[in-house]
């Protein structure tokens, strides 16, 4: 691949590796300031110099306005080389006929617009902006070249965003350090090339205060994600109260603890089943962690997500029948269960037995309330209350927040741990979470929490009574459960 085509040259390190990498699928970045956009634009420039009019690239972002910065960067690099920019068509054309288009991909259905087209290179900026990989994978079918140009898929990303879960599971978790070629079940190769701001020497020399401004821009979690590329920390997460202290090494659960099973239905999407135990008295785990009385411990889960080639396929269900799921739950239940709660949707009858009947278990419909409303608790608030550590104290039982979580799980509950901490707020309804993400385990946790809600005890207004002569009686203080 020739490199004399531009005054802009890739920087030594990750950016140069991106430009020269021959692997079919490349994901680059993982932190702020790593030179991601320039890297992809240079990659296309060098391929255009080598393959001429046969090089046909297309550059995507989630929304059209987000493309402006990349287009301006592209102008700086391409226009001095004689490329032409067509504003209406949002297309750069090189003197030798190579092209690079800029397009938004806002909805899943937008991918259908490109079916039948032919591209040699796909470029996706900020991959985690897409909550679902389906439209992106659909566009892979447009990668082809009758002229023999090596077709490639490129993407950049940072931790966080609606697609954090699937991107992390797909490209980061198999090899967090990167630089390892991974082979999928179809024989396709992919690689993660991590890059941090420290790898972008040009930026550090031109703007030495950049990292200082990043450190001033938000919480320590945000800074760690942006500067270090830490995918285990998600800024703006719906459950920002999730903490490592909620995850425990497995131990033998005492037989006298009450047991509850909760369930969320799924077919094309995953189903989620959780087995819970309620701590009877303060309990010290073998690790020396105190589980307070009333603590809810998730000690087993069965999550119906698809695996291929030993890798999880986020948000893709097993399409099992209700009867098969019921049998699977029975086979995994080795103890007496005190209560069974499930997604109310499974009790609906539509011309035949409901899914609940077909499962053949003792489920009752869970309270499906998500957000608190007048006179009714919200399920998400119940989860938060348990996560932040609300527990009962004092003679009158008034609840206080002492910072000790009142809910947690064994580290074998891998899909809860994978999905719940990464869930995001709904952009249009901040008090709710984004249901486009993989929220099935969270829904099932919510059903459990609403089956045993934490109820604050509050002092009511003073009740004043008068005796027959109109004189004030001794005031009565009423305490009641809210």
Image (spheres, helix red, strand yellow):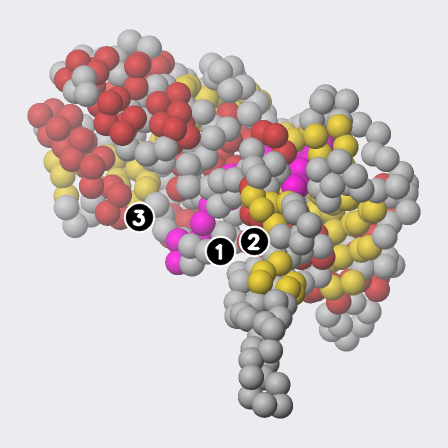
Which label sits on residue 432?
A: 1
Q: Nearer the viewer, residue 286 or 307?
A: 286
Inspect the magenta stretch and tell me whether residue 408 lies in it: yes
Whichever of callouts 3 and 1 sits on the residue coming sooner in the sequence is 3
Find residue 407 and report its image quarter. Answer: top right
Find residue 463 and report its image quarter. Answer: bottom right
Q: Is residue 151 left or right of residue 255?
A: left
In the rendered image of this protein, does residue 218 appear above or below residue 360? above
What's the distance in space between the residues labelled 3 and 2, CA to CA?
30 Å
Which label sits on residue 310?
A: none
Which label sits on residue 63?
A: 3
**Disc 2 designates what residue?**
380
Please state the extent of the stretch shown in magenta in the rendering: 406-428
Task: Tell me whether the residue at label 3 lies in contact with that at label 2, contact meaning CB atoms closer than 8 angstroms.
Answer: no
Secondary structure of the residue carrying numbered label 3: loop
Residue 14 percent location from the top left of the image? 35, 15
In front: label 3 or label 1: 1
What's the distance in space between the residues labelled 3 and 1, CA to CA?
23 Å
Q: Which part of the image, by quadrant, shows the N terminus?
A: top left
Q: Visible in this render: residue 279?
A: yes
Q: Is residue 193 left or right of residue 208?
A: right
Whichever of callouts 1 and 2 sits on the residue coming sooner in the sequence is 2
Secondary structure of the residue carrying numbered label 2: helix
How many residues crowd around disc 3 within 10 Å: few (fewer than 14), some, or many (20 or more)? Answer: few
Residue in the picture at 59% in, 81% down:
465
Q: Visible in this render: residue 308?
A: no
Residue 114 percent location from the top left of the image? 38, 48
In front: label 3 or label 2: 2
Task: Tell me whether the residue at label 3 lies in contact with that at label 1, contact meaning CB atoms closer than 8 angstroms.
Answer: no
Whichever of callouts 3 and 2 sits on the residue coming sooner in the sequence is 3
Q: Which part of the image, by quadrant, shows the C terminus?
A: bottom right
Task: Tell me whether the residue at label 1 lies in contact with that at label 2, contact meaning CB atoms closer than 8 angstroms.
Answer: yes
């Amino acid at each position: 691949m020739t490199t004399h085509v531009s005054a802009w040259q890739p920087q030594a390190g990750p950016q140069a590796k991106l430009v020269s990498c021959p692997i079919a699928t490349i994901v680059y970045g993982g932190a702020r300031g790593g030179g991601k956009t320039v890297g992809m634009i240079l990659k296309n420039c060098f391929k255009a110099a080598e393959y001429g009019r046969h090089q046909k690239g297309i550059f995507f972002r989630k929304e059209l306005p987000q493309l402006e910065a990349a287009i301006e960067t592209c102008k700086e690099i391409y226009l001095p080389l004689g490329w032409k920019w067509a504003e209406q068509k949002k297309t750069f054309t090189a003197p030798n006929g190579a092209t690079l288009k800029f397009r938004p991909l806002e909805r899943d259905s937008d991918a259908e617009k490109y079916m039948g087209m032919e591209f040699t290179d796909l470029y996706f900026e900020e991959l985690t902006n897409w909550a679902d990989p389906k439209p992106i994978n659909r566009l892979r079918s447009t990668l082809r070249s009758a002229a023999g140009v090596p077709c490639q898929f490129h993407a950049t990303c940072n931790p966080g965003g609606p697609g954090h879960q699937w991107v992390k599971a797909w490209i980061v978790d198999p090899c967090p350090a990167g630089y390892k070629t991974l082979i999928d079940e179809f024989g396709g190769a992919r690689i993660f090339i991590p890059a941090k701001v420290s790898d972008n020497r040009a930026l550090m020399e031109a703007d030495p205060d950049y990292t200082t401004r990043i450190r001033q821009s938000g919480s320590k979690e945000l800074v760690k994600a942006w500067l270090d590329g830490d995918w285990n920390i998600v800024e703006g997460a719906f459950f920002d109260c999730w903490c490592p202290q909620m995850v425990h090494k497995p131990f033998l659960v005492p037989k006298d603890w009450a047991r509850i099973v909760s369930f969320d239905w799924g077919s094309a999407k995953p189903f989620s089943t959780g087995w819970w135990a309620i701590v009877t008295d303060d309990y010290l785990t073998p690790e020396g962690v105190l589980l307070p009385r009333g603590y809810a411990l998730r000690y087993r889960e069965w999550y119906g997500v698809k695996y291929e080639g030993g890798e999880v396929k986020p948000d893709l269900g097993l399409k099992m029948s209700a009867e098969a799921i019921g049998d699977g739950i029975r086979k995994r239940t080795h103890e007496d269960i005190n209560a069974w709660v499930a997604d109310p949707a499974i009790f609906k009858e539509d011309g035949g037995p409901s899914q609940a009947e077909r499962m053949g278990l003792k489920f009752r419909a869970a309270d499906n309330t998500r957000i608190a409303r007048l006179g009714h608790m919200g399920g998400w608030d119940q989860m938060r209350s348990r996560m932040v550590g609300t527990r009962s104290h004092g003679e009158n039982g008034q609840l206080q927040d002492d910072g000790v979580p009142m809910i947690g799980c064994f580290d074998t509950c891998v899909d809860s741990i994978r999905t719940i901490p990464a869930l995001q707020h709904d952009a249009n309804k901040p008090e709710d979470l984004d249901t486009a993400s993989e929220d099935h385990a969270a829904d099932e946790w919510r059903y459990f929490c609403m089956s045993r809600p934490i109820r604050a005890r509050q002092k009511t207004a003073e009740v004043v009574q008068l005796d027959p002569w109109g004189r004030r009686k001794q005031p009565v203080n009423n305490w009641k459960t809210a």
